Image (cartoon, helix red, strand yellow):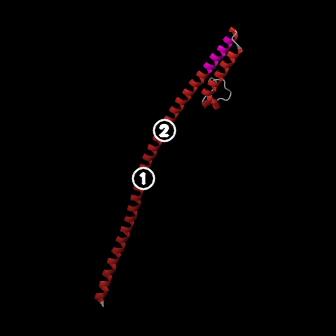
Amino acid sequence: GGGAGAAGGHLHTTMDYVEEYALLVIVAAVVLYFVVKKMMQGVDHVSYEIKSRKAEDSIRRAREAQQARYWEETAARREELERIQKEREAGRLEDMAAANEGRTSKNKKTLKAKDTRDYWDNAQGFNHMNPGGGGGRGYKPS
C-alpha cells in the first residue's frame, strides 16, 4: 500500500496548492471587486457632479432671467404708476383751472367722472400693490 500512500501525499500537496491559490484568487477577486466598485462610484460621483453643476447652471440662468423679467415688469409698472400720477395731477390742475375760470359745475363734473374712470382703468392691474393709491413714489419692490 506504499504507492497509494505516496500518491495520497502527492495529491494532498496538490490540494494545498489549489486551496492556497483558490484563496489568493478569491482575495484578488474581492480586492478587484472593491477597487472596481470604488472606481465606478467615483465615476458616478463625477458624472453626478457634472450633472448637478449643469443643473445649478440652468437654475441660476433661469433665476437671472426671472429677475430680469421681474425688473422689466416692475419698471413698466412704475412707469405706468408715474404716468397715472401725472395724469391725475394734470386732471386736478385742469379742475382747478376750470374752477378758476368759472366754468359750469356740470362741465367740471363730466371732466371729473371721465378722469376717475380713466384712472381706474389704468390702475386696475397694480392697484393691489399699493392700496393707499398715492402713486409709485412709495412703492418699493421687496
Residue in the image at 67% along x and 19% along y:
110
Secondary structure under tag 1 reads: helix
Residue in the image at 41% along x and 58% along y:
37
The earlier-in-sequence mark between 1 and 2 is: 1
Name the residue carrying label 2.
62
Q: Quadrant of the C terminus?
A: top right
Q: Quadrant of residue 90?
A: top right
Residue in the image at 62% along x and 21% along y:
85
Secondary structure under tag 2 reads: helix
Marks 1 and 2 sit apart, C-alpha to C-alpha, by 26 Å
Within-10-Å neighbours for mark 2: few <14, some 14–19, many 20+? few
- Front one among 60 and 48: 60
Q: Quadrant of the N terminus?
A: bottom left
Name the residue carrying label 1.
44
Give coordinates of residue 95: x percent, y percent. Answer: 67, 15
Amino acid under disc 1: Asp
Q: Residue furthest right?
A: 105
- Front one among 142 and 4: 142
Give coordinates of residue 10: x percent, y percent. Answer: 30, 81
Q: Which residues, given as a range, are shown in magenta? A: 85-98
Q: Residue furthest top?
A: 101
Left or right placement of residue 51 versus residue 8 in this view = right
Give coordinates of residue 25: x percent, y percent. Answer: 36, 68
Left or right placement of residue 26 versus residue 103 in this view = left
Within-10-Å neighbours for mark 1: few <14, some 14–19, many 20+? few
- Front one among 140 and 40: 140
Amino acid under disc 2: Ala
Residue in the image at 37% along x and 65% along y:
29
Between disc 1 and disc 2, the foreground one is 2
Q: Quadrant of residue 98?
A: top right
- Front one among 104 and 20: 104
For the stretch drawn in magenta, the main secondary structure is helix
